Amino acid sequence: MQFYDECGSIMHTEGDTWVCRSCENEEQRDSQAEAVMATQDGQQDDGAPAVADATQGTTETMQEPCPADDCDSNRASYEMLPKPGGSYEVRLFTCVKCGHKWRES
């Protein structure tokens, strides 16, 4: 892909020349410069990058009573997650005693 420096538009090839899509300016093609350009054929999609979970291995807890009927614990670990489609976060709790999970209401 080549851009024309004067207007910043993408150029396309026509024979031995690059032609600007906006102003129709032409430049001679340079086979050595084109040889180093990356193409989609030479690239691969490795999928989404791994996201580190900052809550893994944490021992931070807070005083929060477990809502499970058969648990009397008042300590829970928590993590903050973005709410899907929203612009705020939701706090998810996990009871340190029974492992029950719930979200902040």
Image (cartoon, rainbow, N blue to C red):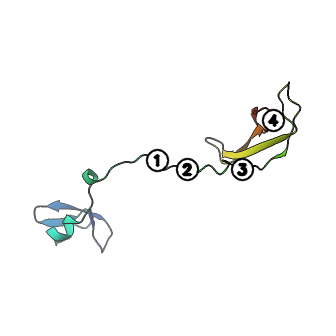
Mark 1 vs 3: CB contact within 8 A: no
11, 102: nearer the viewer: 102
Which part of the image, by quadrant, shows the N terminus?
Answer: bottom left
Which residue is disc 2 drawn over? 51
Q: Is residue 60 above or below residue 32?
A: above
Mark nearer the N terminus (1 vs 4): 1
Q: What residue sits right under mark 3 in the picture?
A: 58
Q: Is residue 69 above or below residue 15?
A: above
Please tell me which residue is depicted at 65% across the width and 51% down the height of the picture: 54
**Tag 3: residue type?**
Thr
Q: Residue furthest top?
A: 69
Q: Which mark is residue 104?
A: none
Query: How far from the left and from the top, in percent, is residue 61?
Result: 80, 47
**Disc 4/disc 2 C-alpha distance (Å):** 28 Å
Q: Which residue is mark 1?
A: 48
User: Quadrant location of residue 27?
Assistant: bottom left
Q: Crowding at label 2, few (<14), some or many (≥20) Cα neighbours within 10 Å?
A: few
Amino acid beneath label 2: Val
Secondary structure beneath disc 1?
A: loop
Helix, strand or loop status at disc 3: loop
Q: Report the mark closest to the observer, 1 or 4.
A: 4
Foreground label between 1 and 3: 3
Name the one closer to the observer, 29 or 52.
Answer: 52
Answer with mark 4 or mark 3, whichever residue precedes in sequence: 3
Identify residue for label 4.
Answer: 97
- Helix, strand or loop at label 2? It is loop
On the image, the x and y values in percent for residue 83 come to: 66, 42
Q: Contact (CB < 8 A) between labels 3 and 2?
A: no
Please indicate whether residue 96 sits to the left or right of residue 40 in the image: right
- 67 horizontally vs 59: left or right: right
